[in-house]
Amino acid sequence: MALFCFVSPLIATDVIGPGILVFASVMATLGLQIILESMRTLIYDGDEFNLTKEQERWVVGIMLMVTLVKLLLMIYCRSFANEIVKAYAQDHFFDVITNIIGLFAALLANYFDGWMDPVGAIILALYTIRTWSLTVLENVNSLVGKSAAPEYLQKLTYLCWNHHRAIRHI
């Protein structure tokens, strides 16, 4: 026997704010981990970065393919009205940007100096932390239960009170 599970649209919208907060927190934490690992690479590994021609072809091919897929996913997710799906679209957009910059930094490190790759990673991690922090700030109103202005509430109460004569009290 199949169970029928109904999720109220009100309940579904109640989890959007916390969902975005959790997702943004994970992304910021990953950014911090990238900064730590890049600093370790700068301190201990220095200029040890070189790719063979075959490795370079694989890196460029994979990064360009992943970037194309992320771009298509971003376009697809932006067609939805749901805030969670729009957060995924935003994540895909950031992935497109970071993949392009990351590939550029890796190629610069391969052809010039090895320190360019971890420095590029640190810059991208700071960008990721900043962007997701701004996303949290945009969605904080849904978490704190912000109320409408008193003037608006008075007008709404007046409209409700005078809507029908059967309404005796509010």
Image: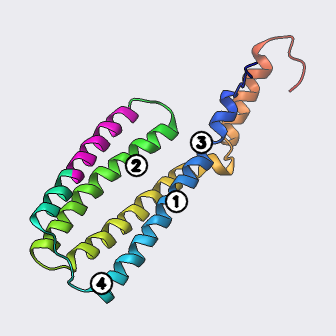
Is-magenta flag for residue 68? yes
Q: Left or right of 53: which side holds 157?
A: right
Separation of disc 2 and disc 4 at Cα? 27 Å
Instruction: Using a 10 Å C-alpha cutoff, classify the residue at mark 4 as few (fewer than 14 neighbours), some (14 to 19) or many (20 or more).
Output: some
| Label at residue 42 | 4
Is-magenta flag for residue 35? no
Indicate the secondary structure of the residue bearing disc 1: helix
The answer to the question of whether label 3 and label 1 lie on touching residues, with beta carbons closer than 8 A, is no
Residue nearest the observer in this picture, 96 or 150: 96
Going 45% across and 39% down the picture, which residue do you hit?
86
**Splitting the image into 4 quarters, where does residue 97 fall?**
bottom left
Instruction: Using a 10 Å C-alpha cutoff, classify the residue at mark 1 as few (fewer than 14 neighbours), some (14 to 19) or many (20 or more).
Output: some
Disc 3: which residue: 16
**Splitting the image into 4 quarters, where does residue 89 fall?**
top left
Residue nearest the observer in this picture, 100 or 132: 100
Q: Amino acid at mark 4?
A: Leu
Start and end of the magenta stretch? 62-78
Disc 2: which residue: 91
The answer to the question of whether label 4 and label 1 lie on touching residues, with beta carbons closer than 8 A, is no
Going 28% across and 50% down the picture, which residue do you hit?
96
Q: Amino acid at mark 2?
A: Asp
Q: Quadrant of the N terminus?
A: top right
